[in-house]
Image (cartoon, rainbow, N blue to C red):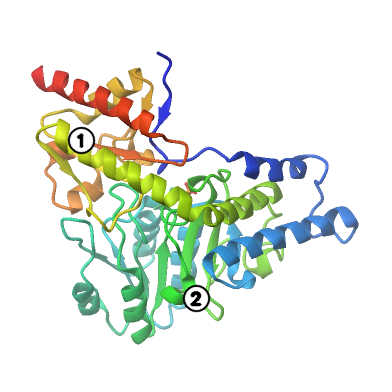
Amino acid sequence: MNKNIYLDHAATTYVKKEVLNEMMPYFSKKFGNPSAIYKLGDENKNIVNLARERVARALNAKPTEIYFTGCGSESDNWALKGIAFANKDKGNHIITTCIEHAAILKSCEFLEKLGFEITYLSVDKYGRIDLDELKNTIKETTILISVMFANNEIGTIEPVKEIAQIAKEHNIYFHTDAVQAVGNVKIDVKELGVDMLSLSGHKLYGPKGIGALYIKEGTNIEKLIHGGGQELGKRAGTENVPSIVGLGKAMEIAYRDFDKNNSKILALREYFITEVEKRIPDVKLNGHRKLRLPGNINFSFNGVDGGTLLEMLNLHGISASSGSACSARNVKPSHVLKAIGLDDNTIKSSLRFSLGVENTKGDIDYVLTILEKEVYKLRKI
Ligand SMILES: *Cc1c(COP(=O)(O)O)cnc(C)c1O
């Protein structure tokens, strides 16, 4: 029984074969510096720009609006600090939410120490922000709104288009952390009206250590990494060519295969949720029933210690998560589950299962059987 069922795609994904194949030559034979003028360099400049075009096409952006970064965290840091530093003469107020990823929350804490004022919007029991609260929070000094596209723990999708509209009416920049959404949700930055959008390679079957920030033309943003003139002079550092190639390919195939994968994963999610609710008494699905990422499942199993359940699943070859990866080994209860109103015991009984393209109905049937058995055993103790 050497099962190996990976249900933690929100933490990271494997690199798809097609992606890896395109990356490989750029580690060895095609190693030139894209800034060099000879052929070896020039070819790499072209390949970086091809990747930029692929990312742009997937988001309906212009290639000149796509900037490669070192990770999703860097994209988030850049958006917040870059807007704060460049626009501090206009105001010092930033609005975000209390359910953001640490890359946003810690950047906000840092900016608070520098004299910026941060408002953290609350969320309802599903994890959605209230647009009226947002409107009431905006003031003269507000320079930026940053609200995640979809939450990494409970999968809830935020009303991004409506937020962008409100931001625009008040002449305020709007950034969205779309690291969980890109590849899993169709995204058109022009149609949404966002000014900045963060994404990361390793959440969409691309490599780790590569991200991108969409920055709408004309946005007044300071740089985070000073140095050479790479990335249109906005982000210094010799390009991570293999990973940029990988991210470009991953974006291309995520949307090429979108409909097929999306309907498959959605069907598996619905099956998983329905079966858990049918077979295991006293469970609670966290997040919104419909407005959620296709692959996200988050359940509280009343009376069960989530950490112990996770270990039991692990013994059966099942990888899931008790929250976000960054806090999986952290004893602090999830700030997201707290924000949607769960008490500490319910939070401790919660697990996240995040589905991916390689999961099958057979996998889910196996997981359901183990889950039912282990929850039953743990509740008897
Ligand atoms: C994973 C994640 C990040 C961080 O991306 P990295 O590339 O791992 O730095 C940021 N925001 C959200 C919502 C994420 O899920």
| Residue type indicated by callout 1 | Val
- Give me the residue at 57% from left, 46% from top: 206
Residue 34 visible in the picture: no
- Give me the residue at 34% from left, 41% from top: 268
**Residue 354 position in % (x across, y down):** 36, 41
SS for tag 1? Answer: helix
**Residue 213 position in % (x across, y down):** 53, 63
- Give me the residue at 66% from left, 58% from top: 51
- Give me the residue at 70% from left, 45% from top: 22
Residue 343 visible in the picture: yes
| Residue type indicated by callout 2 | Ala
The residue indicated by pointer 2 is 86
Q: Is residue 184 left or right of residue 335?
A: right
Q: Is residue 8 above or below residue 67?
A: above
The residue indicated by pointer 1 is 276
SS for tag 2? Answer: helix
Verify CB contact (< 8 Å) between mark 2 and mark 1: no
Q: Is residue 308 left or right of residue 42?
A: left
Q: From the image, which quarter does the C terminus lie in?
A: top left
Q: Is residue 31 above or below residue 213?
A: above
**Residue 306 position in % (x across, y down):** 22, 30
Residue projecting furthest to the right: 38
Label 2 to label 1, Cα distance in Å?
49 Å
Q: Is residue 119 left or right of residue 48?
A: left
Q: Is residue 96 above or below residue 90?
A: above
Q: Nearer the viewer, mark 2 or mark 1?
A: 1
The residue nearer to you, when weighing 25 against 281, is: 281
